[in-house]
Amino acid sequence: MSLAQANKNLKFDKRMTERNLTVGEVSKEEWQKHLEQLPDLSHNVEKFTIDGKNASASTEESH
């Protein structure tokens, strides 16, 4: 893979956001449009407490 192709693949990579916005690789409008197109994956979240126990399991156990 060429360096140009690798950079293209990283255009919307979260780790490159600040750099790409600063140097003009991505406009704020492009970035906002990209964010709006991302799927909502909040249903995949597993909640937990600081002590490491699963929050939903501990809530279910207390009922």
Image: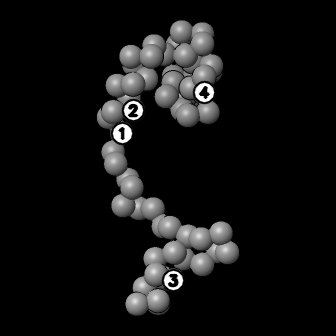
Give the numbered dot on residue 58: 3
SS of the residue under disc 2: helix
- Is residue 1 shown above or below 25? below
Q: CA distance from mark 4 to mark 3?
A: 38 Å
Where residue 56 sits: x, y (%)? 46, 77
Read off the residue under disc 1: 38
Read off the residue under disc 4: 16
Q: Residues within 10 Å of mark 3 (few under 14, many from 20)?
A: few
Q: Quadrant of the N terminus?
A: top right
Instruction: Residue at 43% x, 23% y: name it.
Output: 31
Q: CA distance from mark 4 to mark 1?
A: 17 Å
SS of the residue under disc 3: helix
Q: Residues within 10 Å of mark 1 (few under 14, many from 20)?
A: few
Q: Is residue 32 left or right of residue 26?
A: left
Q: Residue furthest front?
A: 63
Where residue 57 sits: x, y (%)? 48, 82
Amino acid tagged 3? Ser
Q: Is residue 27 left or right of residue 38?
A: right
Instruction: Residue at 33% x, 33% y: name it.
Output: 36
Q: Quadrant of the C terminus?
A: bottom left
Residue 4 quadrant: top right
Q: Mark 3 or mark 1, which has the lower sequence index?
A: 1
Where residue 41 sits: x, y (%)? 38, 53
Read off the residue under disc 2: 35
Q: Residues within 10 Å of mark 4 (few under 14, many from 20)?
A: few
Instruction: Residue at 34% x, 25% y: name it.
Output: 33
Residue 2 visible from this viewpoint: no
Mark 3–mark 1 contact, CB under 8 Å?
no
